[in-house]
Amino acid sequence: MAALRLSLALTLAALLAGACFSPRQPGCAFSCVADGRCPAGYSCEPDGLCHRDDGVGSCDFKPQDAGRDGAADAENDTAADVAED
């Protein structure tokens, strides 16, 4: 009987702890440059960042474009020598 009570108490504690979970949801912190996709509750904006749909929070940084990984090495060669990220 004591084992059953302990099991129920641990289960209840785990459920209550899970109910308190509240992840941070910044105003913008995700890049959507590559595929235009954002987490639920965010939309991809022209600055290449996912912004909260409810407008809460601010965006104090801008993504930096690293550009191409390699340049063409011949006049008729238009492809980069290495894959783009």
Image (cartoon, helix red, strand yellow):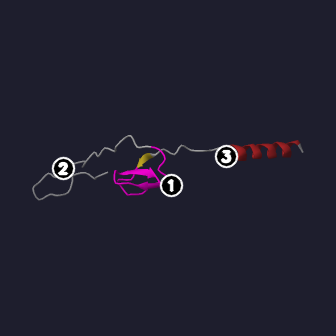
The kind of residue on which mark 3 rests is Gly
Observer-side mark, 3 or 2, equals 3
Give the number of the disc on residue 68: none
Q: Along the horizontal axis of the image, is 15 left or right of 85?
A: right
Where does label 3 land, which residue?
18
| Mark-to-mark CA distance, 3 and 1 | 21 Å
**Is residue 41 highlighted in magenta?**
yes
Q: Residue at x 39, y 40 (%)?
A: 60
Between discs 3 and 1, the one toward the N terminus: 3
Q: Residue at x 14, y 51 (%)?
A: 73
Residue 61 in picture, x, y percent from top left: 36, 41
Where does label 2 land, which residue?
71
Residue at the front extreme of this rendering: 55
Between discs 3 and 2, the one toward the N terminus: 3
Where does label 1 land, which residue?
41
Q: Give SS at disc 2.
A: loop
**Is residue 4 highlighted in magenta?**
no
Q: Is 57 rendered above or below residue 36?
A: above
Residue 38 in picture, x, y percent from top left: 44, 55
Q: Nearer the viewer, residue 27 or 11?
A: 27
CB under 8 Å between discs 2 and 1? no
Residue 36, quarter of the rendered image: bottom left
